[in-house]
Image: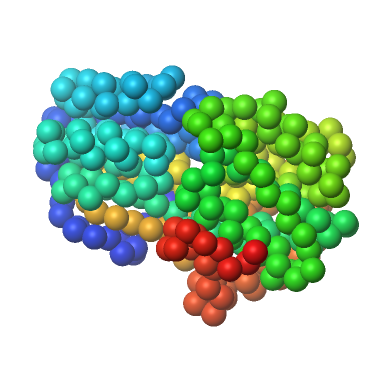
Amino acid sequence: MKRIVLGLVAVTAMATAAVAQEEFAPALLYDLGGKFDKSFNEMAYMGAERFKEETGVEYVEFEISNDAQREQALRRFAERGRNPIVMAGFTWVEFLDKVAPDYPDVSFTIIDDRVDQPNVRSITFKEQEGSYLVGMLAAMASETGTVGFVGGMQVPLIGKFECGYVGGVKAADPEARVIRNYTGDTPAAWNDPTKGGEITRTQIDQGADVIYHAAGGTGVGVLQAAADAGKLGIGVDSNQNYLHPGHVLTSMVKGVDVAVYNAFMDAMNGEFTYGAQDLGLAEDAVGYAVDEHNEDLITEEMRTAVEEAKADIIAGEIEVHNYLEDNSCPYW
């Protein structure tokens, strides 16, 4: 996915950060599930690693194991001169909102939610747009007319994935059935591959032959169960096609890595900006992955249909509903 050019997207409060070269000491905080979750956190890690490889500049990182560590970790990094500090995940909002005002000279970036503080860059994505496209692919690939969705925690953010996916399924096949389940109501829901596999097998028993997950590390179990049953999974956040070649139809990818890379690079170059950025198909920030592991699963007809829909979404001719706007979905 190409680098998102921040100057081309709408940015609120475009003040330039005062991160001087001598103050530059980047840090990255992961969400629950660990940096090698093969999904969201790992994409953040990849962005930081790309920055380190290109610049030779080291960064520090921290993997939390419980919510009680969040505020402590933020304060520790800020007090030790870490700047900028990037957080991966919406669950950092409450803590960043509390900590950021105490360190006005530190530049913070939060990915997947917004914090309205003058020293914070907030990066969100239009997951509903990418999910719409993979929903179309799911419906076109399904032989049973029934597809599945497995979410982690049932929170509004994941509602964007779920609702967009159902919209794409229904656009490609209005008669298709979508089975929807979540793995839990605590943060543990993001790191329970066993539960993900159990839910997937239940959906398969109900006729689903393509299952999309938006469940972090739990999704590894979803993809495994689908592959074991000879069905198709759909990955999320990172390109997960390689996990089960021939059994992952595609992956809904989003530029978490680019968000981390840009935050570090902009701060190093004295070009850091604050405010909210909401990135979608138009910015090449979300999309679907096609590579050597799944290219035989995506027919020319499927790809043409999805590319046409992508162009129409960018042009505003198709409006994919954003679940966060009203906590509802018109597609079910």
Specify the quadrant of the image occupied by residue 221: top right
Residue 273 placement (x, y as % from top left):
22, 51
Q: In the rendered view, does 183 fall on the left or right side of 141?
A: left
Image quarter hosting the C terminus:
bottom right
Q: In the rendered view, does 153 fall on the left or right side of 244?
A: left
- Is residue 61 something that shows in the picture? no
Residue in the image at 27% along x and 26% along y? 71
Q: Eyeballing the image, is 279 above or below 172?
A: above
Residue in the image at 58% along x and 59% along y? 163
Residue in the image at 58% along x and 34% along y? 184
Specify the quadrant of the image occupied by residue 98: top left
- The residue sitting at the bottom extreme is 317
Q: How many marks?
A: 0
Residue in the image at 36% along x and 29% along y? 29
Specify the quadrant of the image occupied by residue 259: top left
Residue 264 placement (x, y as % from top left):
30, 38
Closer to us: 268 or 287? 287
- Is residue 70 something that shows in the picture? yes
Q: Eyeballing the image, is 278 above or below 316?
A: above
Residue 115 placement (x, y as % from top left):
27, 47
Q: In the rendered view, does 43 fall on the left or right side of 301?
A: left
Residue 251 placement (x, y as % from top left):
64, 47
